[in-house]
Amino acid sequence: MLGGIYQIRNTITQKVYIGSARYFFTRWKKHERLLNAGTHHNAHLQSAWEKYGASVFRFEVLEIVAKSKQLCATEQRYLDAIPRKQRYNIRHVAESNLGLRHTPITRQRMRESNRHLSHTEEAKEKNRQAHLGKKATKSTRQKMSRTRKGRNQSTEHAAKRTAATARTLRRKSILNWDLVDELRRLRVEGMSYAALARRYGISNEHARKIALDLTWCSKDRLLDIRLGS
């Protein structure tokens, strides 16, 4: 392995991009290809590349690191030594995909650094599409539940979530608005909840709530019509 810490330096402004790599040559060629294509992940470096031109940038080795597990910590040392205004790096905490486990303090710094990053609507939509149809594991659901605890939702937001859940349940139900109207008419004519439940394949309690307009409410019918469901 011939890798370690490197910098991409703007020879006009002396501003640098600090990075780490297991193989210097491969990493530089990747940076160069992305920058020339205008698709580099670092918008600051990409903008400077387009403004000043490729000829003013130099790829320079700062330190050779023998063990890949030491790359992240060594890169962080260089990031800490160079003022942020003199760096192109968007993230100020070194990250690695080599299995290094960050300390709680480092993870907190990473969260604070990433908190200011924003995603485009296109990126959000791609992320949403990528997760369609995926079911969270039990442990993931538990983590999500713990994360939400203690959060104060506005009355409007809570009402929207409740309405959305109700619409989803209605779509999955064996009933429709015509059957609901028929159930209510039969109840008015004297049919028992038990008989209604058997007729429509639902529970006695569900039949009672529908008959009393506690679920499948009139206001929901208007909302469903507006939404086209």
Image: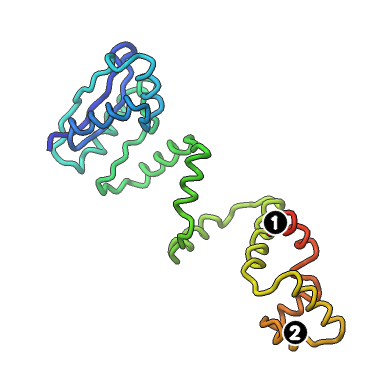
Q: Position of residue 72 (x, y in %)?
A: 26, 38
User: Which residue is at a point 20% across and 40% down the rendered structure image?
Assistant: 70
For label 2, count other residues whose C-alpha is less than 10 Å away and answer few (under 14), some (14-19) or many (20+). Answer: many
Say which amino acid is labelled 1: Gly
The residue identified by callout 1 is 228
SS class of the residue under badge 1?
A: loop
Q: What residue is drawn where x is 37% and y is 24%?
A: 46
Tell me the kind of residue under disc 2: Leu
| Image-quadrant location for residue 23 | top left
Left or right, 181 with respect to 202, comes to right
Assign a secondary structure to mark 2.
helix
**Residue 76 quadrant:** top left
The relative height of residue 65 versus residue 135 in the rendered view (above or below) is above
- Vertically, is 138 above or below 174? above
Q: Nearer the viewer, residue 132 or 142?
A: 132
Which is nearer the eye, 85 or 172?
A: 172
Q: Is residue 141 above or below residue 100?
A: below
Q: Dot 1 surroundings within 10 Å: few (below 14), some, or many (20 or more)?
A: few
Q: Quadrant of residue 227?
A: bottom right
* Residue 62 location (% of width, % of height): 20, 25
Q: Which of 48 and 13 is in front in this view?
A: 48
Name the quadrant of the C terminus.
bottom right
**Residue 220, percent across and down?**
75, 62
Eyeballing the image, is 31 above or below 108? above
**Residue at position x 63%, y 52% in the image:** 152
Q: In terms of sequence position, does the residue under pointer 1 or pointer 2 come before the other? A: 2
Numbered disc total: 2
Mark 1 vs mark 2: give the one in front.
1
Q: Residue 196 carries which label?
A: 2
With 183 as the anchor, is 91 left or right in this view? left
Q: Which mark is residue 157?
A: none
